Image (cartoon, helix red, strand yellow):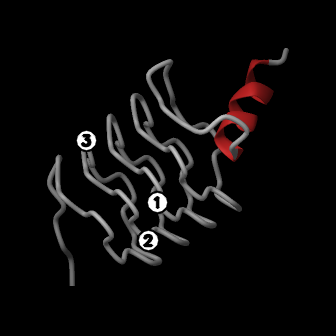
Amino acid sequence: MKYEIKPGANLREADLLGADLKGADLYRAKLYLADLREANLKGTDLYFANLEGANLYCADLREANLFGANLFGANLFGANLEDIMYSAETQYSEGSILDNYIKKKRVP
Protein backbone atom coordinates (compact mmCIF):
# COMPACT_ATOMS: atom_id res chain seq x y z
CA MET A 1 0.00 0.00 0.00
CA LYS A 2 1.33 3.45 -0.89
CA TYR A 3 0.70 6.58 1.11
CA GLU A 4 1.27 10.20 0.16
CA ILE A 5 2.82 12.62 2.62
CA LYS A 6 2.23 16.26 1.76
CA PRO A 7 4.68 19.12 2.43
CA GLY A 8 4.12 20.58 5.90
CA ALA A 9 2.57 17.34 7.16
CA ASN A 10 2.26 16.94 10.93
CA LEU A 11 4.06 13.68 11.69
CA ARG A 12 4.94 14.51 15.29
CA GLU A 13 5.89 11.30 17.17
CA ALA A 14 4.97 9.21 14.09
CA ASP A 15 6.18 5.60 13.93
CA LEU A 16 7.99 5.51 10.58
CA LEU A 17 10.36 2.67 11.47
CA GLY A 18 11.87 1.35 8.22
CA ALA A 19 9.64 3.57 6.07
CA ASP A 20 10.59 4.06 2.42
CA LEU A 21 10.42 7.83 1.96
CA LYS A 22 13.01 7.98 -0.81
CA GLY A 23 12.70 11.25 -2.71
CA ALA A 24 9.67 12.43 -0.71
CA ASP A 25 8.84 16.13 -0.44
CA LEU A 26 8.78 16.75 3.32
CA TYR A 27 9.21 20.53 3.07
CA ARG A 28 8.40 22.04 6.49
CA ALA A 29 7.18 18.65 7.77
CA LYS A 30 6.75 18.39 11.52
CA LEU A 31 8.71 15.26 12.45
CA TYR A 32 9.35 16.20 16.08
CA LEU A 33 10.23 13.01 18.06
CA ALA A 34 9.36 10.82 15.03
CA ASP A 35 10.74 7.28 14.91
CA LEU A 36 12.65 7.14 11.61
CA ARG A 37 14.99 4.31 12.54
CA GLU A 38 16.29 2.51 9.44
CA ALA A 39 14.09 4.70 7.21
CA ASN A 40 15.07 5.30 3.58
CA LEU A 41 15.27 9.08 3.24
CA LYS A 42 17.65 9.10 0.27
CA GLY A 43 17.15 12.26 -1.77
CA THR A 44 14.31 13.39 0.47
CA ASP A 45 13.51 17.12 0.65
CA LEU A 46 13.59 17.98 4.36
CA TYR A 47 13.89 21.71 3.68
CA PHE A 48 13.00 23.51 6.93
CA ALA A 49 11.58 20.28 8.40
CA ASN A 50 11.43 19.97 12.19
CA LEU A 51 13.28 16.78 13.15
CA GLU A 52 13.98 17.87 16.71
CA GLY A 53 14.47 14.80 18.90
CA ALA A 54 13.72 12.43 15.99
CA ASN A 55 15.28 8.97 16.04
CA LEU A 56 17.19 8.56 12.76
CA TYR A 57 19.25 5.58 13.92
CA CYS A 58 20.71 3.85 10.84
CA ALA A 59 18.53 5.96 8.51
CA ASP A 60 19.69 6.48 4.91
CA LEU A 61 19.95 10.25 4.43
CA ARG A 62 22.20 10.18 1.36
CA GLU A 63 21.61 13.23 -0.85
CA ALA A 64 18.85 14.51 1.47
CA ASN A 65 18.17 18.26 1.48
CA LEU A 66 18.55 19.46 5.08
CA PHE A 67 18.61 23.19 4.27
CA GLY A 68 17.18 24.97 7.32
CA ALA A 69 16.12 21.71 8.98
CA ASN A 70 16.00 21.52 12.78
CA LEU A 71 17.92 18.46 14.01
CA PHE A 72 18.49 19.52 17.63
CA GLY A 73 18.65 16.39 19.77
CA ALA A 74 18.10 14.05 16.81
CA ASN A 75 19.71 10.60 17.06
CA LEU A 76 21.85 10.17 13.94
CA PHE A 77 23.91 7.25 15.21
CA GLY A 78 24.67 4.94 12.28
CA ALA A 79 22.86 7.21 9.79
CA ASN A 80 24.31 7.51 6.29
CA LEU A 81 24.99 11.22 5.76
CA GLU A 82 26.86 10.88 2.46
CA ASP A 83 26.30 13.85 0.15
CA ILE A 84 23.66 15.50 2.34
CA MET A 85 22.87 19.13 1.54
CA TYR A 86 22.83 21.61 4.40
CA SER A 87 23.07 25.35 4.95
CA ALA A 88 24.03 27.84 7.63
CA GLU A 89 20.34 27.71 8.63
CA THR A 90 20.47 23.96 9.36
CA GLN A 91 20.15 23.56 13.13
CA TYR A 92 21.87 20.80 15.11
CA SER A 93 23.44 20.22 18.50
CA GLU A 94 27.09 21.11 18.97
CA GLY A 95 29.15 17.93 19.24
CA SER A 96 26.44 15.87 17.50
CA ILE A 97 27.15 13.38 14.72
CA LEU A 98 25.95 15.97 12.17
CA ASP A 99 28.17 18.65 13.70
CA ASN A 100 31.19 16.35 13.45
CA TYR A 101 30.30 15.35 9.87
CA ILE A 102 30.06 18.99 8.77
CA LYS A 103 33.32 19.90 10.50
CA LYS A 104 35.11 17.04 8.71
CA LYS A 105 33.70 18.18 5.34
CA ARG A 106 35.12 21.67 5.87
CA VAL A 107 38.68 20.39 6.40
CA PRO A 108 40.58 20.38 3.08
In percent of the image, x 32 and y 35: which residue is there? 48
Give, as a three-letter code, the residue at label 1: Ala
The residue positioned farthest toward the right in the image shown: 108
User: Residue under circle 1?
Assistant: 54
Give coordinates of residue 95: x percent, y percent. 73, 38
Of residue 93 and residue 102, the one placed in the foreground of this image is 93
Q: Are marks 1 and 2 in contact (CB under 8 Å)?
A: yes
Q: Which of the two marks, 1 or 3, is nearer to us in this view?
A: 1
Q: Which of the two marks, 2 or 3, is nearer to us in this view?
A: 2
In percent of the image, x 54 and y 62: which residue is there? 56
For marks 1 and 2, give the CA distance: 6 Å
Above or below, 65 against 10 in this view is above
In percent of the image, x 36 and y 43: which residue is there? 46
User: Residue under circle 2?
Assistant: 35
Dividing the picture into quarters, in which one does residue 89 lie?
top left
- How dense is the environment of label 1, judged by Cα within 10 Å: few (below 14), some, or many (20 and up)? many
For marks 1 and 3, give the CA distance: 16 Å
Image quadrant occupied by the N terminus: bottom left
Tell whether 8 sits left or right of 87: left
Q: Which mark is residue 27?
A: 3
- How dense is the environment of label 3, judged by Cα within 10 Å: few (below 14), some, or many (20 and up)? many
Disc 3 element: loop
Q: Which mark is residue 65?
A: none
Image quadrant occupied by the C terminus: top right
